[in-house]
Amino acid sequence: MVRSYNNLYHGWINLYKDSGLTSNDALRLIKSIFKGCKIGHAGTLDPMAKGILPIALGEATKTVPYIHEKNKTYLFAIKFGEQTDTDDATGKIIGKSDRKPELTNKICLQTMLKINQIPPIYSAKNLMGLIL
């Protein structure tokens, strides 16, 4: 919910970001609508990812660190049988293997649990302002 006082906006917008758009592209769009308002987002989505990008306005930007501490849920699709140099669908294929659906199904059933995600080498992850 977004509220206005002192001619500024304060609150959260859950923006649906489609694939092909960067998180910064989405922020620029919101900044063009809420001119002069402090704006931040709670996480970066890959350009080819689509989903909800939580955007904080005004005083709500002070709560962004608390959102980062919360658990997140991801739904995704995987294409088995190809390896790329960027670990995603946009990279150059550097390896192929035979797909074995019965083995894939068995492994998926065995690994359906909560895991801590380790960010890939190509990511927006940073530590103390430095990109890792």
Image (cartoon, rainbow, N blue to C red):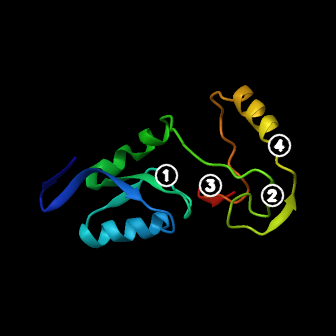
Give the foreground label among 2 and 1: 2
Is residue 56 left or right of 90 when viewed as pictured? left
Q: Earlier in the sequence, mark 3 or mark 4?
A: 4
Q: Earlier in the sequence, mark 2 or mark 1?
A: 1
Residue 60 visible to an observer of this rendering? yes
Q: For mark 4, what is the residue?
A: 100
Disc 1, SS: loop
Amino acid type of the residue that numbered disc 4 sits on in the rendered structure: Lys
Point out the image quarter for the C terminus. bottom right
Q: For mark 1, what is the residue?
A: 43
Coordinates of residue 68 in the picture (x, y in percent): 48, 42
Q: Earlier in the sequence, mark 4 or mark 2?
A: 2
Is residue 112 left or right of 99 when viewed as pictured? left
Is residue 68 left or right of 82 when viewed as pictured? left
Q: Are marks 3 and 4 in contact (CB under 8 Å)?
A: no
Q: Who is closer to the viewer here, 108 or 115? A: 108
Real-space CA distance between mark 3 and mark 4, rounded to the nearest whole angstrom: 37 Å
Amino acid type of the residue that numbered disc 1 sits on in the rendered structure: Gly
In the figure, 44 relative to 31: above or below? above
At x 58%, y 47%, the residue is: 76
Is residue 17 left or right of 87 when viewed as pictured? left
Give the foreground label among 4 and 1: 4
Q: For mark 2, what is the residue?
A: 83
